Structure formats: structure tokens, C-alpha cells
Amino acid sequence: MPRSVSTVATFAPVRAGLLVSDIHARIREAILTGRVAPGQALRDSTVAEQMRVSRSPVREALRMLEQSGLVTKEPNKPYVVVEFDANDVRELAGMRTALETLAVRLIVHRGEPTSGFGDELDALRRAVDGGEASTIVRADRRFHRAVVDAAGNSRLTSSYDGLRDQIVLAMLSTDAPARGHVGLVERHVELAALLAEAITSRDATEVVARFERHILDGMDCAGLF
């Protein structure tokens, strides 16, 4: 039986004028940092009371979270944070691999130098130094989102962003964050270097294979393909 959100996290009041977007951001943050765990109920009445707002904007924020795949709802029951099983993780790993390797191919085909992803790598270093799993996973996502964005394909970016929060939650549901901190920064530095080399040589073969292996290992799905 799902527990009320009040047993896991409380929400501070929000400012009038931001309402739905602020409520959505706060609940999303609570889910992606583990303050509200998978399987936990999110009752609109409880959240509304804690945030000192009406239930209507809370319901709208929860519907937005349902669309992004972070919560689910059955008739006459509260919203519940999704719980990913092994099959869900495999599906997300497969989709993520397809989208990111497509991005890599497009970048190499275009042949234009990237930024080098220095800011993203610095953020990942800071996250690893801090040791907080959810922060590390999101810094990891920032690097990979930057690679997708570098492909310059808005539809690809939109498709990737539609899965982005689910990927974070899926990774947190595995032991990947705990076992993957050692060498994590170095692996991403290597990916960036391989991509730069591939752009120069115009040969995506090695970097695509490396991205695929990196993604599947990171999501504990080695051998998926």
C-alpha cells in the first residue's frame, strides 16, 4: 500500500504567480532526489495543504509529471511515483542508446567541432567529488544531453528530453550510481575525446560503439543487443 507523501517529504509554500510551474518543479525535484521514493503516493490534498495552494494547480502539475513518466495514476486513487522493473530499465536503455548514437552519427557526419563539453565535465567532476548519487546521475545526464543537443536536430532533442527524467529515475533504481563513481569522469573525458577524433576523421564507427557500451554498462544492461 503506497504511503502518503507526508511520510517522506514536505513541501514549502509556493509564490503566487508561479503556481503550476513551481509546483511541478518542486515535486519533480523531490522525486529525482529520492525524497519521494518510487511507489510513494502523492495526494493532491496533502501537497496542496503543505504548499498553501488550491488543489487545482497541484493536480495540473501532477498531470504534467504523469506525461513525463514520473508518476502514474489509477482511477479513484492518488498519483504514485513510478517503480521501474528490470524490463522498464532495459526498454529505456535501448531507447537511450538509439537516440544518443544517432546524435553521435549526426555530429560526426556534420563534421563541425563541438564545444568539447568542458562545462559539463567540470560539473560531473564536482558531482563525483560531492558523492551524492542523485547529483552525479543528473550531472551525467547533463553531459549526455549536451551531446544530443550538439547534433542540431530539434526533433531528436525533443524525443530525448521526453525520456530524460525517466532515465534519471531508472538509473537511480539500479546500483549503477554506487558502482560507477570510480572512473566516471575519466570515461566521459574519453567519450568527448573520441567524438572529437571522429569528427576529424569523419568515421563514427568506434565512437558509436563506445557510446553504446558506455550507456548499456551504465544502466546495468550489458548484452542488451
Image: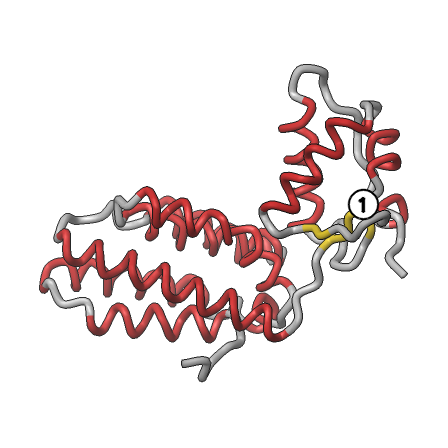
Q: Which residue is mark 1?
A: 42
- Residue 198 image point, x, y percent: 17, 63
Between 94 and 125, the one lying in front of the other is 94
| Position of 138 relative to 21 (above/below) | below
- Residue at x 89%, y 54% (from the top left corner): 3
- Residue at x 78%, y 59% (from the top left corner): 39
| Position of 24 relative to 178 (above/below) | above
Category of crowding for the residue at label 1, using alpha-carbon neighbours closer than 10 angstroms: few (below 14), some (14–19), many (at least 20)? many
Check the image and name the residue furthest to the front: 75
Position of 196 with respect to 93 (left or right) is left
Image label count: 1
Q: Classify the position of the C terminus by image quarter.
A: bottom left
| Position of 135 relative to 214 (above/below) | above
- Residue 136 image point, x, y percent: 55, 56
Position of 33 with respect to 159 (left or right) is right
| Position of 57 relative to 148 (above/below) | above
Amino acid type assigned to the residue bearing label 1 in the image = Leu
Q: Image quadrant of residue 43?
A: top right
- Residue 46 image point, x, y percent: 88, 37
Tag 1 secondary structure: strand
- Residue at x 81%, y 54% (from the top left corner): 40
